[in-house]
Image: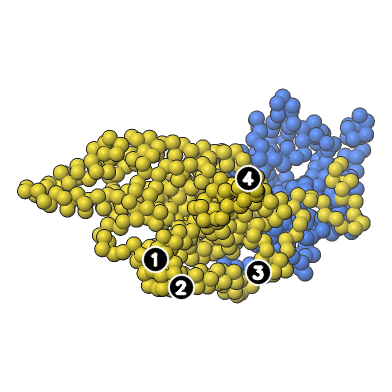
Chain colours: A blue, B yellow
């Protein structure tokens, strides 16, 4: 199976601190993957590298069947290639309506001129309505997104990611700050999304990861410590030491 | 959602109607076509005010909507003024020189005329030759094109360098101040080719219109300024009403997020910065023929800061707010600094507004910033009953039953 994203031998250090240490990681085109690890394991830095926010000191990040290198692109180019990212805190445009938020994310030409003369088509509106249905915000479309509850904002952000139609979704702690019911809905959304694309979920809540029921990669001190099913990795001696033993 | 542009933006129609009524009223009360209740000099003041409103709209686009606090847009305004000023001065001097040389026994050659014009214009700074920047001053179409091209090119180069390096926030503001200061200092030099601190003068005399009275010229410029303001307002409203507006407001509120959505933030910033510089240049080109004189003090850093103050007082992030702020503050400023405001005797001290106006303006700015962050324009929201969600900076939504704060801090 050819992989969608291949990270190999990547290292990055900040002022002498090795945030990522010879990390290698691979994910297929339609796969759900959870990345867990204690604080400072390099989970967020890993996402920063893939999305172009941080440049690694060495290593390769290859993308798609053509093995394009993501290291030569900037954030917006990588996003247009099909990498979507959800931040830890919900970051939606609070001063704008749910509809506008989704409309902005919809996969369209991103160049200033074409956006300036862009006019909504019926198909676009239907697509936004469909997405709103999926994330359960149909009746909130015309509210300012700043008025939404925390969980709703998280969903809106997931909806915006889906609107981008990315091939790879990077999701940073989607369940943080959610109620139990909200968590279940989020799990369903992610599982559904992973049927057609690759989804990487960074989380350190074991219960949530267990509910996702997917392959798990454990990071520790910037490198992969273990990989496998949740039961496999939670029985790993090293993983137990890292999580509990310190 | 399928309504027309005006139905979606009722404020545009209201604004254009009010502007048309205002123009009509000034015309009917002016000396040229009406009763003469408004003096020609006041018509000029009003025309200049409309130009300031136009540059305030540009400032609102770049600051209020895109979140780039540029403190250098008056540099573009001034450059537009200089570009039109060069032609006005050249063409008028040419007429005068041609008239005086016509008395001579031998008809002058074109070179002689050119030298005579140069001596006339640059005698004041001890020069007698045309500097290279005046190469096109004889041609109105070229200078009109330069009104747009010179500010646009400067903004494009400056913006490209600044945005590409991801200079944002207060650092960008300082950089734009440095730009306008550098331009002012350069223009102050006698050998800059633009007559140093004398600037360009006599711009109110339109070449070839010597027998048309100023009262008519001033009302024509007033109309032109009103038309430019209307066009600028429409353009700005068009830009901010659609998806483009959505994107630039997104850049203002969270630029990293917009980047991860796949929009080239730098490209958008450069686009808005350059376009607003062009608008500022056009506004300047209409302003200075009404003012009659332009000198380097016009592009001093303080001018651009005033521009930001107008927009802040009027209410940034809404176009009519910028217009209200610019009109109100600049007219009040004219009234106070022109010595028309009655002094306030306090017994032990007399408050003379010429000296105290700036204190009053500063106080007003501080009060607006503290108590009415959305400016005077925000009052319209009270009337319309429209309110923004007051959740900026609050990351964690207060939803009952969730334990988000504790969790998010893990």
* Secondary structure state at the residue bearing disc 2: helix
User: How many other residues sit within 10 Å of disc 3, few (<14), some (14-19) or many (≥20)?
Assistant: some
Residue drawn at the location 77% of the way across and 32% of the way down: A222
Check disc 3 and report the residue beneath it.
A125
Comes first in the chain, label 4 or label 1: 1
Closer to the camera: disc 2 or disc 4? 4
* In this picture, residue A139 sits left or right of residue B275: right
- Residue tagged 1: B219
Measured Cα–Cα span from mark 3 to mark 4: 66 Å
| Mark 2 vs mark 4, CA separation in Å | 44 Å
The chain to which mark 1 is attached is: B
Quadrant of the image occupied by residue A155: bottom right
Please tell me whether residue A221 is drawn above or below residue B106 in the rendered image.
above
| Chain where mark 3 sits | A
Q: Residues within 10 Å of mark 1 (few under 14, many from 20)?
A: many
**Please, is residue A166 above or below residue A46 in the view?**
below
Marks 4 and 1 belong to one chain: yes
Residue B15 is situated, as x and y percent measured from the top left of the image, at 55, 69
Q: Which residue is mark 2?
A: B24
Residue at disc 3, secondary structure: helix
Q: Which residue is rendered at x = 74% and y = 47% of the image?
A: A87
């Amino acid at each position: 199976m050819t992989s969608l994203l291949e990270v190999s031998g990547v290292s990055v250090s900040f002022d002498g601190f090795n945030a990522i240490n010879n990390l290698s990681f691979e994910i297929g085109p339609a796969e759900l993957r959870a990345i867990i690890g204690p604080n400072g394991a390099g989970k967020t830095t890993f996402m920063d590298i893939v999305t172009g926010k941080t440049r690694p000191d060495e290593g390769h990040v290859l993308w798609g069947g053509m093995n394009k290198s993501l290291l030569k692109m900037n954030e917006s180019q990588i996003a247009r290639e099909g990498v979507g990212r959800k931040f830890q805190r919900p970051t939606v445009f609070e001063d704008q309506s749910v509809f506008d938020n989704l409309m902005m994310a919809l996969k369209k030409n991103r160049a200033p001129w074409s956006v300036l003369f862009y006019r909504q088509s019926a198909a676009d509106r239907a697509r936004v309505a469909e997405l709103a249905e999926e994330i359960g915000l149909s009746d909130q479309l015309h509210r300012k997104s700043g008025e939404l509850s925390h969980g709703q904002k998280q969903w809106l952000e997931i909806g915006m990611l889906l609107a981008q139609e990315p091939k790879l979704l990077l999701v940073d702690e989607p369940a943080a700050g959610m109620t139990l019911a909200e968590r279940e809905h989020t799990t369903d959304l992610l599982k559904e999304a992973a049927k057609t694309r690759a989804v990487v979920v960074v989380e350190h809540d074991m219960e949530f990861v267990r509910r996702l029921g997917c392959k798990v990669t454990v990071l520790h001190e910037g490198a992969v410590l273990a990989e496998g099913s949740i039961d496999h990795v939670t029985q790993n001696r090293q993983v137990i030491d890292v999580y509990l033993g310190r | 959602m399928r309504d027309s542009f005006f139905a979606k933006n009722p404020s545009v129609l209201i604004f254009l109607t009010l502007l048309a009524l205002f123009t009509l009223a000034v015309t009917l009360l002016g000396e040229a076509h009406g009763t003469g209740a408004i003096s020609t000099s006041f018509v000029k003041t009003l025309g200049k005010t409309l130009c300031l409103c136009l540059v305030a709209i540009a400032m609102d686009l770049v600051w209020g909507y895109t979140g780039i606090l540029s403190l250098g847009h008056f540099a573009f305004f001034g450059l537009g003024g200089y570009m039109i000023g060069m032609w006005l001065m050249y063409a008028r001097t040419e007429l005068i020189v041609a008239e005086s040389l016509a008395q001579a026994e031998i008809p002058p050659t074109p070179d002689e005329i050119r030298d005579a014009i140069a001596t006339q214009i640059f005698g004041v700074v001890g020069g007698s030759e045309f500097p290279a920047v005046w190469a096109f001053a004889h041609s109105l179409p070229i200078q009109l094109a330069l009104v747009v091209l010179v500010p646009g090119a400067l903004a494009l180069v400056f913006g490209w360098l600044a945005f590409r390096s991801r200079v944002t926030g207060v650092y960008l503001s300082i950089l734009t101040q440095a730009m306008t200061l550098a331009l002012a200092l350069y223009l102050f030099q006698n050998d800059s080719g633009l007559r140093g601190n004398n600037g360009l003068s006599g711009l109110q005399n339109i070449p070839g219109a010597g027998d048309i009275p100023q009262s008519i010229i001033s009302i024509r410029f007033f109309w032109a300024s009103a038309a430019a303001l209307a066009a600028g307002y429409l353009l700005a409203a068009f830009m901010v009403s659609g998806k483009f507006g959505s994107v630039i407001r997104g850049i203002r509120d969270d630029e990293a997020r917009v980047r991860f959505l796949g929009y080239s933030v730098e490209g958008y910033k450069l686009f808005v910065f350059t376009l607003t510089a062009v608008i500022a240049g056009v506004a300047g080109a209409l302003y200075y023929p009404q003012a009659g004189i332009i000198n380097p003090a016009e592009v001093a850093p303080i001018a651009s800061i005033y521009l930001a103050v107008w927009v802040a007082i009027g209410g940034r992030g809404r176009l009519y707010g910028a217009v209200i702020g610019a009109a109100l503050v600049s007219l009040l400023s004219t009234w106070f600094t022109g010595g028309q405001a009655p002094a306030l005797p306090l017994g032990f001290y007399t408050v003379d507004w010429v000296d105290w106006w700036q204190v009053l303006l500063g106080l007003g700015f501080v009060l607006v910033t503290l108590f009415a962050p959305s400016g005077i324009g925000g009052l319209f929201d009270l009337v319309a009953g429209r309110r923004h969600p007051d959740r900026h900076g609050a990351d964690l939504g207060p939803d009952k039953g969730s334990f988000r704060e504790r969790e998010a801090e893990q």
